[in-house]
Amino acid sequence: MLESVLWVLLVGFFAGQLARRVKLPELVGMIAAGILLGPQVANRLGPEMLEAASGLRTIAVMVILMKAGLGLDRDKLAQQGTVALRLGFLPAIGEAIATALLSMVLFQFDLATGLMLGCIIGAESPAVIVPGMLRLKSLGWGVEKGIPDAILTGSALSDVLLLLVFSLLLAFLTQSTSGLSLPGGVTLSPVQLLPLQVVSQIALGLLLGWLVARLVVRLLANQNWTQNAVQDAIVAASIALLLVVVAEVVPIYSGYLAVMATGFFVIELDGPLARRLRSGFDSLWVVAQLFLFVLLGASIQLNVLEGVLLPGLLLLVLGTLVGRGIGWYLSTLGSNWNWKERLFLLPGNSAKATVQAAIGAIPLAQGIAGGDTMLAIAALSILVTAPLGAWAIPTFAPKLLTRGDVDPTKVSVSKTLVLLAAVDTSPLAVAVLTKTAELARRSDASVIVLHVERAEDRDRTLDLQATAQRLLADIRHQFLVVNGSMPEAIVTTALHHNVAEIVMGKRGDRSQDGRSHTLDRVLMGSVSQAVLETSPIPVVVVEEGQ
């Protein structure tokens, strides 16, 4: 097991980074690593790891859905509420029906078997869509109309619906169908129960999400059971995973929807806690995605693709363009989305991976006719749509969506911070560099040390550089020496390197020996004043003696 974990972490990570360097989504490399490590190629993953794959994928999906909930915006959902609701049902239903009809022609399935395949193929992948939509929100694409929020919510709802229909069809085709007997001799068939199950799954999922969010806030914010953000994330993740586990044992609510709702309600109840959890789950996702996509690749059975490749591709294309396309059109009918934003649903709402890996092999295991074909098409859908969707979302968003202001209270905004320390050869440089080091350590920033050299300073520049190296030894930094006007050089360099803050010094009235340094004081005071007046970047002024 330990060896398998090492293979997943190391090979999965470097395969993902290799894919990123050649301008492909990281998950492409991770899935490829899983195929390579899996039983059909190198067979480097032990049976214990493969047996635990389903549970590990569940943990990873829980993490990404919690991230989705912590990134939802109530105002945007209210603005696009009907669109989000329709996106949760109409595209999934359209693709499932289109797939069923096409499978009756291409594979001679009956209607029930075709609908089961439609439920497998029609489900959307949170593992691809959620990171993609959260990245768009962090960059501002489509946020004005709440497009990422609508897609996130619709994706979660559609999976609830299709998984319920799938379980109904599975019971029907395996002859284990049972209804519900009510007082008075009334019996409801599974088909009649389906609407009640959908309502129950959604309503109870939302209710439990609200209750668990209140519990999380009480434990982590009000009663202070934890001491840092890492412990916050561990406790919240454990409670969220409990929701999913209980839902598998008592399937009266959607565990995944409850997790997503928990994150959403935490934002409403305690914004600061939501920000801490958002950061913690971002870190958890770094590891979780490796297990999710590598094990996803290992579960793909390439040998079953033979014989269904071309008809399978035709089914996927027509099911998406016709069935899902009609659903997209009806979902956005009457909304304020323009044609480009509607067209974005094609790359933004079509990826398949997680659900297909979870349920694709069930029909074959249950002995249902055509189960081998269903498994092959499920594997094909992962290989085609997951990499394509992960690539298409960031590629087409700038072409089809408009960019708005980013709301940092609803999504993590990852940005590498750079600080600029403007120093001269006076003793005040030590105070400036010390303050810069303190700020850099707090925010994990890198530093540019800028020295505007004067003729009389040249002999002391090397000493200044050695001082910077000593005080910033544990911080990434570079030492720049330029000539020219001090205020202009400082502001120009800061803008060129896109720094977050400028740190510079200002001398007091007297030196340590009590003598006045009027010329230096006036000079440094005028430089700091000029930078304060002209810089569009925040300036931290360190005065002598601080």
Image: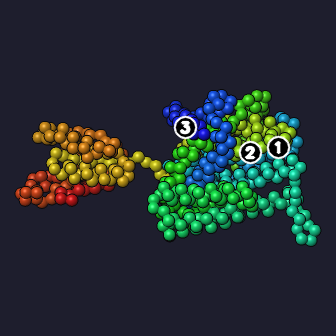
Q: Which mark is residue 6?
A: 3
Number of other residues with Cα within 10 Å of mark 2, as a class: few under 14, some 14 to 19, many 20 or more: some
Report which residue position mark 1 lands on. Answer: 366
> Of the residues under marks 2 and 1, which one precedes in the sequence?
2
Residue type at the position of mark 1: Gln
Residue to which mark 2 is pinned:
359
Mark nearer the viewer, 2 or 1: 1
Would you place residue 500 above or below residue 227 in this image?
above
- Vertical placement of 212 versus 107: above or below? below
Give the residue displayed 14% in from the left and 40% down from the top.
Answer: 460
Q: Amino acid at mark 2?
A: Ile
- Point 66% across, 44% down: residue: 52
Q: Which quadrant does the N terminus fall into?
A: top right
Report the Cα–Cα distance between label 2 and label 3.
27 Å
Of residues 144 and 241, the one drawn nearer to the viewer in this rendering:
241
Neighbours of disc 1 within 10 Å: few (<14), some (14-19), many (20+) = few
| Residue 240 placement: quadrant | bottom right
| Residue 440 against residue 307 in the figure, above or below | below
